[in-house]
Amino acid sequence: MYESPVVLIIADDASFPRDLISRWQLERTVPGFTVMSTERLNGASGNFDIALAGPVRNGRLTAVLKSLDDGSHPVICILESAHELQTVKTEYPRLLALQRHEGWLESVMLVATECLKRVELAARVRKAEHSAAANAGHAALGRYILETRHDFNNLLTSALGNAELLLLDGGNLAEVARDQLETIHTMTLQMHEIMQRFSSLAAEIQVAEKQSQDETPKLSQMTVSAP
């Protein structure tokens, strides 16, 4: 399951994070928040999903934007003037710059929510890629077992046959040797049963795949012919 996202808010104006968090708490899904002033900027870590930069002290905006402009997270910068807005858009094209105006909270919420949706989608894609890579390894192992199961079964048959022949002549064996031979026979039988189950499972999968392939064209025809 996807973990709750974390929003990093950087601002020197205490009202900015307060207003933003209060508005966010009206939503159905509320992320976690990390609030930080520019004085603590060096302590910022990458443990967040999106960053929002608000009003900061004079001369500190450039340092804030440089620290966030690494491309690893979405960044929304809320600026006071149109001049600042144009400057940031020119110097930091990867950042999302918005001007603070009446109704700015709704604009920020709309953009931030969409960014978090993309962050979640990217996380799901990465998880699916990892699962696909793991499944590919399992599939390769399964194919190898399928390709070698006949040879393996032949080896097991030979081992079972020889063990049974020796047990038939068990009177000439020492008690310890006979016990060991019976253990070999029992374990070989269990391995044979495992391989038989594997073969049955492979056959079941092939039947299920064939049924699925046969049903797909029928469903397609039904869809096409539907009014």
Image (tube, rainbow, N blue to C red):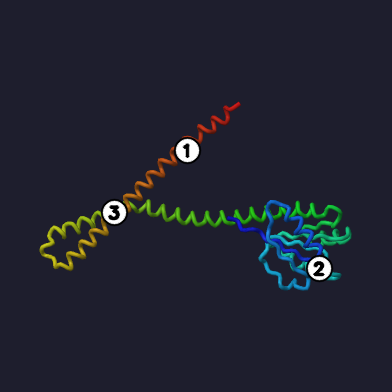
Observer-nearest of 131 and 44: 44
Q: Residues within 10 Å of mark 1 (few under 14, many from 20)?
A: few
The picture places residue 142, in percent across and down from the top left corner, at: 41, 53
- Mark 3 to mark 1 CA distance (whole Å): 32 Å
Q: Which quadrant does the C terminus fall into?
A: top right
The picture places residue 177, in percent across and down from the top left corner, at: 18, 67
Q: Give the SS element for disc 1.
A: helix
**Who comes first in sequence, dot 2 or dot 1?**
2
- Mark 2 to mark 1 CA distance (whole Å): 62 Å
Q: Amino acid at mark 1?
A: Gln
Image quadrant assignment for residue 208: top left
Residue 213 numbered mark, or none = 1
- Mark 3 to mark 2 CA distance (whole Å): 72 Å
Q: Which residue is mark 3?
A: 192
Q: Is residue 133 left or right of residue 93?
A: left
**Who comes first in sequence, dot 3 or dot 1?**
3
Q: Is residue 133 left or right of residue 7?
A: left
